[in-house]
Amino acid sequence: MTLEFAERIRRIPSYPLAAGYDLGAQTAMLASNESCFAPSPAVAEAAARALAGANRYPDPSYAALRGALADRYDLPPERIALGNGSCDILLAAGEALLEPGAELVYAWPAFSVYPHLAAASGARAIEVPLDSEDRHDLDAIASEVTVATRLVLVCNPNNPTSTAVSLEAIASFLERIPRHVCVILDEAYVEFSLTVGDTYSSVDLFQGLRPRRAAGRLRAVRLRGVPVSRRSGAPAVLSQRRSAGGRGRGASPSGRRGTARNARRRGPAAARRGVASA
């Protein structure tokens, strides 16, 4: 007799094994957010000092780092959430927002972890094909939003196609999304995008949204050579994210690679609107 695992575990797509990313010490995989530069000596020294307190439980709210980031970017600390990689934040957002009967909308192909959110929660994933130039079709994504939609993911620039849409287009898109929907702008690779331009301009964009808009921007950053992810957004959403993500979950293996297979829609929005409103 063998162990029987939960159905939601069987639904989760397999993620590439970390061993498959080992290309040797001389190769840095930018797609996995690796750097060819070692951490700053100051970081190594700070880490060594921190080991002296390893017998004590760390602050799960990351208050010191959140406070420093809040000062740096002129944001309230409650609008900042931190995680062990962007996978950690995305999965926690899915756990906080999604459940059976809810819907998640994103372009496809995109970051390969996105399907995990629906699989783990039992929500329905609506995958919208990229346009003819392999960019996000924001009009098509907006048309798939219904009363059942809880979360929309926009990967900009997109992984794996490297294409991007302008922040002006993002701003126009957000104005079309109902207030009950949370939108996450995934900017893990924004530093490589010439289309987006100023890598911090989306902070001002999200700060200027109309009241009660549940939206946030996700960044995969390196603090002097050490990777960490942060998200800024609506306090209520981030409070639920910290509750969902505060139980010690680690991030998925490094690497943010999508696949171009099986780009598809899983049902017309009009039909889903009828079901949702019934």
Image (spheres, grey):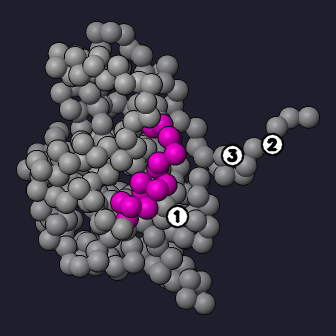
Neighbour tally class for label 1: few under 14, some 14-19, many 20 plus, Cα within 10 Å: many
What residue is at 51 percent from the left and 83 percent from the top?
A: 273
Residue type at mark 2 is Glu
Cα separation, mark 1 vs mark 2, equals: 24 Å
CB contact under 8 Å: marks 1 and 3: no
Q: Which residue is mark 2?
A: 4
Numbered mark located on residue 10 in the image: 3
Cα separation, mark 3 vs mark 2, equals: 10 Å
Q: In the rendered structure, does residue 275 fall within the stretch colored magenta?
A: no
Pick the quarter of the image with the C terminus: bottom right
- Who comes first in sequence, dot 3 or dot 2? 2
Residue type at mark 1 is Leu
Residue 101 coordinates in the image, percent (x, y): 60, 72
Q: Is residue 277 visible?
A: yes
* Residue bounds of the magenta highlight: 237-251
Instruction: Give the structural element (helix, strand or loop) at label 3.
Output: helix
Instruction: Give the structural element (helix, strand or loop) at label 1.
Output: loop
Numbered mark located on residue 98 in the image: 1
- Who comes first in sequence, dot 1 or dot 2? 2
